[in-house]
Amino acid sequence: MKLCYVDQEQFTNLKKENSRLKTLLSIGGQNDDGTGFEIITENDVIVNRFAENTVKFLRKRGFDGLDIDWEYPKKETKRNYILLLKALREAFDKKETNGQSRLLLTIAGPPGQYYIDPGYDIPNIARYVDYVNLMTYDYTTIHATVTAFNSPLFSRKDIRFNPTLSTNWTVHYWQARGLPFHQMLVGVTGVGRRLVLSNVNETDVGSSVTGDIRTGDIYGIPGGLAYPEICSMLTSIKTERYFDYEQRVPYLVKGDDWVGYEDKESIDIKVPWMMRLGVAGIMLWSLDQDDFTGKFCDAGKYPMMMTIKAAIDKEIGPLTSADEVDPDIRFLTGENQARTNVSCLGCVVSFSCTVFLLVMRWLKCG
């Protein structure tokens, strides 16, 4: 993995603007086949050396932790995955010296049972990591045969639909298998699933689609539109927006285009739901898929991120300097947060094979 030091330094230096900010380096991702993880977990010598070198790298470059985005460990590598997390946890804890803050360890967690059951020893994952970033999106794909939502809050009651395909199902499945709510960061996505209707007169959820794959003009995501592209589509007089109250997400129809996505209305429902469960926070995938320029959605810069923050503030009130806060994860507030998001975007997209997670925490510590 190539890492541009100038960009990395610019990214970690954002903490000078916002002392509450924590920056994590993420390795792996959806475009990585997992071979690297399989190699470094082949034996104890290699995995322990990797853990020690990781600590040195993170400290030298000013990162506050590491996110493991292995997509996905299999039945054959399930045990090795835990050995990797154990080695990292022990190395992180051993190096917690000289007044330096404790390094954070997080992982990306899949939303579906197909990947969870064979590859994830959830009780031991909970033992070694600080948080699991649940990828509660991509519940429908470009291979869908009917219209369905990319990131619904609840499952559909209709027996034609898989009841496991929702944020609610994923969160409770992980919890039932050993991950406490307070170790979960639940995902919200800026990408909507773009499907092509077989019949323009049949637009309800569950309508037949052709299987054609279209991309947006800006991001070029196969079968998907980023939030700025969705906002642009909504400006057309030919576009109709609907809200599905069963699954708590919107969708739009323009000709034979059908797009299920997230917006302010769905986020304003999803955030209080998460808070009532007591999850640790929200993971937004991803900053560059939000309207970071403020030119597309007529809602300022980073409307999705700011909607999430506003929804949290509405529930508990904005954080002030007088509040007692977890020293490892600090809530991003006010102007500092807005500047941080804007400044950090270039870094996020310039790093190779990395994702940076900005965690918003609403649980106040005594």
Image (cartoon, rainbow, N blue to C red):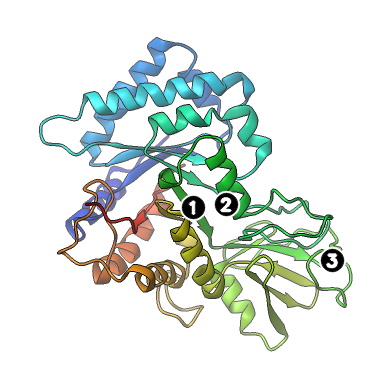
The residues bearing labels 3 and 1 have C-alpha atoms spaced at a distance of 29 Å
Q: Nearer the viewer, mark 3 or mark 1?
A: 1
The residue labelled by disc 2 is: 136
Q: Position of residue 326 (x, y in %)?
A: 24, 50
Residue 207: mark in rendering: 3
Residue neighbourhood size for the residue with mark 1, other residues' Cα within 10 Å, grouped as few (<14), some (14–19), many (≥20): many
Camera-side residue: 326 or 261?
Answer: 326
Q: Secondary structure at mark 1?
A: strand
Vertical position of residue 2 compared to residue 364: above or below: above
The residue labelled by disc 1 is: 186
Camera-side residue: 317 or 110?
Answer: 317
Residue at 21% across, 59% down: 18
Marks 2 and 3 close (CB-CB < 8 Å)? no
Q: Earlier in the sequence, mark 2 or mark 1?
A: 2
Decide if residue 331 is in sight here: yes
Disc 1 residue type (three-letter): Val
